[in-house]
Image (cartoon, helix red, strand yellow):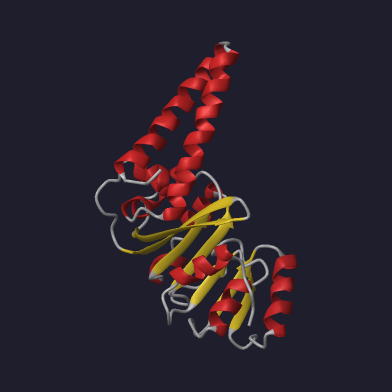
Amino acid sequence: MIRISKRLAAIGALVTQGNRLADVGCDHGYLPIYLLQRRHIPRAIAMDVRPGPLSRARENIEAYGLLDYIELRISDGLEALEPGEAQTVVVAGMGGPLMEGILTRGVRQLACVRELILQPQSHIEHFRRFLRKLPFTVVCEDMVLEEGKYYPMMRLARGEPEDEWVEAEYRYGKYLLRHRHPVLGDYLHREEEKLRKLEEELRLAGGSRAVVRLEQIRKDRAFAREALEKYGFDK
């Protein structure tokens, strides 16, 4: 059985059992291998824009005897996926802006998709706001800490977005806050402390540029404290 990272295992846990999977930016192909070995999915399409990663994915898939179940395709985002081929689409391990572009250009391919599993690496708040424009709604979130880095991720189901989110939900995740996710609590405590120290440094530094930066840091710190208090994360 293949061993994968905590991040990839958490992403896999969000995939609905029995769905056909399309893994966009599959890299080494570990996720579809992992899910097929556990009989969580029946088939998968592993796609990457670069021949190198796809070649490595092929080697790994062949080594585990799964070439009959995982199809490999060169694809710029969702370009090589046909409507109806996959019920679940995973896009993970990329910057938020890149993922926004993939999902925006893939409207035709997403027409028959039932769920999206997304794990953006940057611009998380902006990415959550972007998701409101899609015909999908966030139904579940998770977050893991691995090798010192925090990885938020989410499952979206087809349907119109629910009521408007508040600022803290865009920043930190509606369901992570609602369920007081322990990893988010750890992140908020560390973030608030980091911002406190940075606020002190900027306050002592002075200067016009420091003043502008200080204003933003104080705002960010206030939101972190509010989330800790409002949503009941223990100190």
Which of 95 and 30 lies nearest the eye of the viewer? 30
Farthest front residue in view: 235
The relative height of residue 129 versus residue 181 in the rendered view (above or below) is: above
Percent of width and height locating residue 217: 48, 27
Percent of width and height locating residue 37: 57, 84
Q: Quadrant of the rendered structure where residue 26 is?
A: bottom right
Q: Quadrant of the rendered structure where residue 28 is?
A: bottom right
Quadrant where the image shows the C terminus: top left
Residue 72 seen in the current view: yes
Residue 79 seen in the current view: no
Q: Residue at x 51, y 41 (%)?
A: 190
Percent of width and height locating residue 182: 43, 54
Percent of width and height locating residue 154: 43, 59
Which of 233 and 17 lies nearest the eye of the viewer? 233
* Lateral position of residue 161 relative to residue 209, left or right: left
Q: Residue at x 54, y 34 (%)?
A: 194
Quadrant where the image shows the N terminus: bottom right
Farthest top residue in view: 207
